[in-house]
Each structure stands twice: as C-alpha cells, then as structure tokens.
Image (tube, rainbow, N blue to C red):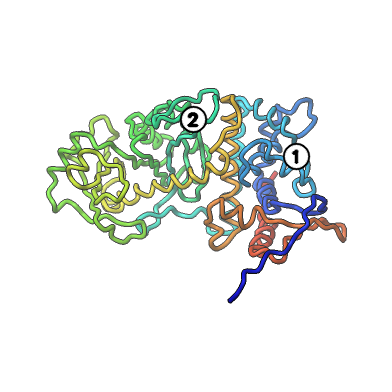
Amino acid sequence: MHTTGSRPKLVVSADGRGVVSHAGSRLLADLADATGLTAAFIDALRRLRPRGTGHAPGRIAVDLAVMLADGGEAITDLALLRDQAEVFGPVASTPTAWRLLASIDPAALAALRAARATAREAAWLQAAETRAGIPAARAGGRDLPGLVLDLDATLITCHSEKEQAAPTYKRGFGYHPLLCFLDNTGEALAGRLRAGNAGANTAADHITVLDQALAQIPDAHRHGTDILIRTDSAGGAKAFLHHIRALRDRGIHASFSVGHPVTEPVRRTIRALPDHVWHPALEQDGALREGAEVAELTGAIDLDGYPDGTRILVRRERPHPGAQLSLFDLDEGMRHQVLLTDTAYGEGSVQQLEVRHRAHARVEDRIRCGKSTGFGRFPSRHFQINTAWLELALTGIDLLVWTQAPLLEGELATAEPKKLRYRLLHAAARITRGGRQLRLRISATWPWRHELTSAFTRLAALPRPAT
C-alpha cells in the first residue's frame, strides 16, 4: 500500500531580490516597440503631456494595453509592471494613468485609432516577411478569398451606476458595445461603446464601426482585396447593406453575408419548398452536416429595397438540446436560420455560402476572449474614460495576435489568451547582471522555457519600421 507523500514544508518570507513575475509580458512591451505602436501612441498623445514633463502619455497608454493583454482588470493592476522597473522600465502611477484616461477626448481617441492603424501596417509587413503573411479565413474546408470582417454586439454587466449604463434587452444592466474582428487573424479592428439600451440593429452604429474597422486595414489590403462583412440579423438593416454596396464606389470590393429574421413570408415560402430543392449542409471541415439541409429562396421572397443582386438562403436542421426555437420551428420540428448575401451566382454553391456565413459564430469566441482582455469590466463611472479603456483593450488583443503570428509556433500560435498567459506571459524569472548586460533568466524547469526564449529571439530579428 502506497501512502501519499506530503509536500515539502516551506518558510515563506517577502525578502526575495532579483525575482520577476509575469516576465513573459516583456515580450508584449517589446513587440509594441518593434511594430512602432509605442512611437505612434507617443506622437498621437503628445499634446496631452503637460509642459513636456513626467511620463509620456503614449507610453502610459501602451503600458495599460500590455497590462490588459496580460490579464489585468483594473488600473491599479499597473502596479505589477511598475514594481518591476528592472524589466518594464518606469511605469506611471495609478493616479497618473487615471488622469490620462480622463484626458482622452474624441480628438485624442481618433489619434489613437490612427496610431493603431499605422502599427498594424507594420505588423502585417513583419508577418509577410517572416511567415506567409495574413492567413486566409476558412469555412467548409476551404480558404475564403480576401478578408472577412465579423461585426457583433455583446452585453457587459455593470455592477454599479455608470454614465450611460442602462437596462439591457436581456433584463440586465450595463453597456451594449458593438465590435468588429478580423476573422483571418482574430485582430480587434474596432469597437463602439454604447448604452445598455442601444438598439441591436441600429444601422448608424454598424456603419460607424465598419468604417472604423476598414480604416484599420492597410491600404494595400483595403483596396483590391475582396472584403466580406458578416453579421447576424442585427446587421440586416437596408441602410447598412446599401452602405456596404456603396463602398465599391470608393474602390473597396465589399460584399455582405448577414442574418435575416424568419418572417411570415419566409415561413410560407419554406413550407411550400419541394423536397428536391433542399441540399445537404456542410460542416466547417467540409464534411456533410448530419440532419441539416440548405435551400435558396431568392425569387420567392420580396427583397424590394435591398441592394441589387441580394440573395436569400435558408438552413433547416434537427434542433440540438437547448436550442432556442420559435413556434414555427416547433410546428415544423426543425430549426430554421435565414441569411442574405450579395455574393454572385457562380462564386460558391448554396452549401458553401451557408457554411461561410455560419462561421460568423467564431466572433463569439473573440468576444469571450476580449472580455478577459479588458472590456469585460469598465473601471470608471465616466463614459469617456470607459470609451478610452475599450480602445486600449482592443489594442491589447492586437498585441496578443501580433505576438502569435510571427513569434510563436505550434499550438501556442493559435492558443487563446488564457493559455498564453498561463504558459508564457506569467512565467517567473530572475534578473542578473554580468558582462555589462542585464539578463532575464527563465527557470530551467519551466515547461515552456524554450518557446518563450525562442519568441524573444524571433522578436529581436523582426524588421523594424522606418522612422
């Protein structure tokens, strides 16, 4: 019989020297420098620096973004960086960070967004020179051409009174931000903080966020590249779809794939469809989806007022446990979902267009991870501060993505932020000096030490943007 061995007895004290926690987060800070993000932020917020003294506001903004990417949830979490000056350098105090966020007005926010776009162009060029560049989004076992932008809204619960926090349609209380992610990479292109009672299908908000997202895409990719915009049915407003179509007049080859409600005319048409027009649906790997079929309703549904060439498709499938069903679904014994797209005939089968749209569900994972990277909690009672916080949270998400693309391999190159933090960013190390060098020594027994040191080596070799 084997007994369970006890853990070694320890004497705990707080007198360690040269010990560093979250050492891997230095990778994010150095990457911000390597992509030109730090320099761009410093230039964007230069006017907010009083009399040219103290911490540079742009550097404070970068430190906040690094802290959020590392998993911090409050401005006071900057203490982790500040108290490890040997690794992270001088970091602003909590009151100084608060003052910066309070001073970011709409003009400064626009400058931050322009700075993010500048750094993104450098990051994409670095990815192109070190790897294969921007990967293709996939659906139905195939690569999708060009870029795919996913817009979706989410609810953020506020547990105290905050400016513009309001009751939500799910009977909660908080904010209702609208976000846009690039499906190819997972980058957070744009976000708009909104009151909790903001409409889900407000065309003006969708247009604003889309335009901000397009401004983040480098010119070489924004023009001459197919760009697919996907949303759920909240993005199906005619004004928004006409805006997408009008982008072609600006040299942006944009198309849409959006959800559509199952209205009474749609129900009547579905009931009248003969069996032979239904085709087996596909899984994301290209295999047949058991119990699911798709059909086209174009020509049988009045699409007056929608952009020319708009098509309407429907999928029906046996509902899975817990699926939300309408009375129509209950009557038919199948779950139905409808979508609109302006993809022309001959550019993909009905099955491929439907599975392409269903891949929009990946944005839910992006949002879930984003809530653990800053915008799951907002720190202030003031809406302007929370708006700036959202922008820095999006920046933190981008830093994580830019770290994975050129610096990591294997499962870490596609891992979610939680895994990256546990394995790399939160690694402990020791600071030593010798030979006129400051060394960061990762524990020789840390399971992912080689991945972390290799990432630092690749970072050092990244081409730098011209200054």
**Callout 2 amino acid:** Tyr
Per the image, label 1 sits on a secondary structure element best described as loop
Q: Amino acid at mark 1?
A: Val
Residue drawn at 39 percent across, 29 percent down = 169
Choose top left, top right, bottom left or bottom right for residue 272: top left
Residue in view at x 75 percent, y 52 percent: 20
Quadrant of res 78? top right
- Quadrant where the N terminus sits is bottom right
Whichever of labels 1 and 2 marks the residue nearer the N terminus, that label is: 1
* x and y, in percent, of residue 348 in the image: 30, 52
Q: Residues within 10 Å of mark 2 (few under 14, many from 20)?
A: many
Residue 161 point in image, percent of width and height: 54, 24
Q: CA distance from mark 1 to mark 2?
A: 30 Å
Residue at numbered disc 2: 175
- Please give the residue where the numbered disc 1 appears in the rendered image: 91
- Please indicate whether residue 29 sits to the left or right of residue 267 in the image: right
Residue 129's place in the image compared with 164, above or below, is below
Q: Position of residue 136 (x, y in %)?
A: 45, 54
Helix, strand or loop at mark 2: strand
Quarter of the view holding residue 422: bottom right
